[in-house]
Image: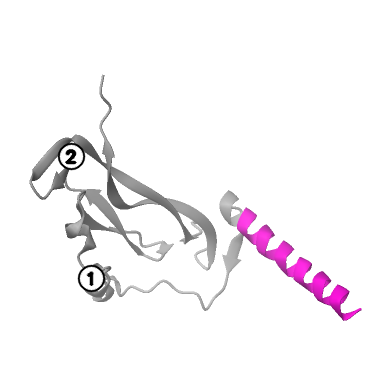
Amino acid sequence: MFLSFFNAKYMVLLSCVLANLTFAKQGQKKICDTSLMISNDFHASLDEDAKGNGNIHNRSLSAWTWIPKFSPHRIPQVIFEAQCNSEYCTLPNGVDMRLNSLPIYQEILVLKQDTEDRKCFKATFERVIVGCTCVWAKTS
């Protein structure tokens, strides 16, 4: 009896999570909360966030630069996006034109402020470049 009650609770919880993820993917669900505020303290956190993951972006064979993308009506307001430094990859002995440097994309979940009601937010996915990688160039 307890096990079937536990399974039923678990299934209801799982259904709610899946429904929320479905709505977030479709960009349909609004979150309205008067205590949810977007801070105007952008520049104070920019320096701290820029430190990010150390210097992995410089040590990579396909190095990149972090570019802050600011949106005043999104949580988080600042998303650091990678920009590949070169079209080709750099090996210890120099640039290898057989290897192309390509961006790595990732979809991240953000809250975007509703244009009609500033107290409401929509959960949506935003595609960002999170790094660069080396791939063999196509040969004819």
Number of residues whose C-alpha sits closer than 10 Å to that of mark 1, classed few (under 14), some (14–19) or many (20 or more): few
* Residue 139 part of the magenta-drawn span: no
* For discs 2 and 1, the disc positioned in front in the rendered view: 2
Q: Provide residue 134's location: percent of width, then percent of height.
A: 26, 43
At 27% from the left edge and 53% from the top edge, which residue is drawn? 82
At 59% from the left edge and 61% from the top edge, which residue is drawn? 30
Q: Distance between the residues labelled 2 and 1?
A: 25 Å
Whether residue 116 can be seen here:
no
| Quadrant housing the C terminus | top left
Q: What span is colored magenta in the figure?
A: 1-22
Which comes before the other along the chain, label 2 or label 1?
1
Residue 120 sits in quarter:
bottom right
Residue nearest the viewer, comparing 14 with 58? 58
Q: Which mark is residue 88?
A: 2
- Determine whether 139 is above or below 82 in the image: above
Q: Residue 38 carries which label?
A: none
Residue projecting furthest to the left: 93
Number of residues whose C-alpha sits closer than 10 Å to that of mark 2, classed few (under 14), some (14–19) or many (20 or more): many
| Quadrant housing the N terminus | bottom right
Whether residue 129 can be seen here:
yes
Q: Main secondary structure of the magenta part?
A: helix
At 27% from the left edge and 68% from the top edge, which residue is drawn? 53
| SS at badge 1 | loop
Residue picked out by circle 1: 51
In the rendered structure, the answer to whether residue 120 lies left or right of residue 20 reads left
Q: Provide residue 54's location: percent of width, then percent of height.
A: 22, 69
* Residue 17 part of the magenta-drawn span: yes
- Determine whether 116 is above or below 46 in the image: above
Q: Provide residue 31's location: percent of width, then percent of height.
A: 58, 66
Give the residue type that dot 2 points to: Tyr
